[in-house]
Amino acid sequence: MMESKNNVCSVMEDDEMDVQVRETKAQSEQSNNNRTNWSNGQCVVAMPSCSMLNPSFDLSLCRAKLENDGFQIPEEDMEAPLKTALEVPSVRRYMVFNSALFHFLMAPVLYLVVWCAVFSTLHVFITVSDYWVLCLSVSLVSIFLTTAIIFILHCSNKEIDMNLDVRLIQVNERLVKHKLMVAVVDWVQSCTGNMQLSFVYWDMSRCLRALTETLEERSFVVNDTQNKLKKKMSHLALVTEETAVDLKVGGSDVEQDPDEQRPLLSQESAGSSTPSSPPEAAKVTTNYSLIPDQSLPAQAKAYQLLMTYSAAYVKLLVSQRLSGPTHHRLRPRRNHCTTAPLCLCQYIKKQILR
């Protein structure tokens, strides 16, 4: 009897283990199937901002939604870099004052300011018998000036935003391993501001291969290609502050004695100053250009260009601002995106290499 009971127990345990293994396999197969159903350019998750006055996104909810769609992303590849890039007070203030809703609300305010300025000027120097003629003239002039100012500001804004798109480059470098790209998308619809964090499915392999082939074909005109990159990407420069001591130590090729690398003022003699908080005079402003170096191989250049413009492309893709033929037959060949007239590599070719 004891042997039969043990056999029954062992059989039940084996059955439970088999059920768990089947469930695990089924879940993994389901997640893989969900992941393979996506095509380039499809928006996987769009997380709206919690507040327009204090833009922030629920990253834990984003991660949960991505897991439901089959994207198993570690915290260090998504939440940590996104918090570093977006949850900075200065960046949040920039997102508020540079939002589409703020610009939409500032347009009538700008018109009123211009109208008052023009009216006060004309009223002093010009005497008009009919008051309505003066008001009509001031209104027309104000409309013209306001439209001109808004147009100039709109044209001065680059498609790639240094304070948002460039900060998301490091995030996309991690997410691209999971076939995702992210960007902050902002637009106004029905007098309501819409700011959201959009995750788009994207398989980078085909764009990387196509852009690498293009750069290899241009290898005989390297100088011409590099001049185009400098002309179109000259404004893409990061300004950082570094300690002068670190730059001197890091940039020297000669081995120095440990005593020579020690700060001139030690912690005891400096009083309240510490190595972690150097004086302002010890900080040096350094500029880092995002233009690929001419000595890099073609594949490395292509990858750097794809990562640099990844967030800007996603922003234009989700907001449907990509210019190009919309009809399927008119789309250019080797388009790796089914939801947009241009894919990422074609966008880079059009904006930079052409």
Image (cartoon, rainbow, N blue to C red):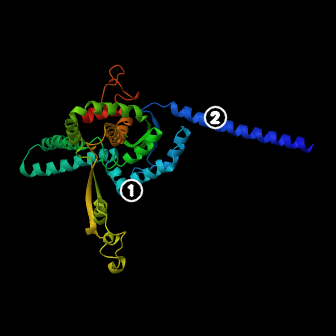
**Residue matched to label 1:** 88
**Which three-letter amino acid code belongs to the residue tagged 1?**
Val
Q: Residue at x 40, y 44 (%)?
A: 173
Residue 86 position within the rendered picture, expressed as x and y whole percent measured from the top left? 40, 52
Q: Which is nearer the N-term, disc 2 or disc 1?
A: 2
Q: What's the mark number on residue 26?
A: 2
| Other-residue count near label 2 (Cα within 10 Å), few / some / many at <14 / 14–19 / ≥20 | few
Using the image, determine if residue 77 lies above or below residue 39.
Answer: below
Q: Quadrant of residue 298?
A: top left
Q: CA distance from mark 2 to mark 1?
A: 41 Å
**Which three-letter amino acid code belongs to the residue tagged 2?**
Ala
SS class, disc 1: loop
Using the image, determine if residue 221 lies above or below residue 256.
Answer: above
Residue 17 position within the rendered picture, expressed as x and y whole percent measured from the top left? 73, 40
Quadrant location, the N terminus = top right
Residue 168 vs residue 230, the one in the foreground? 230
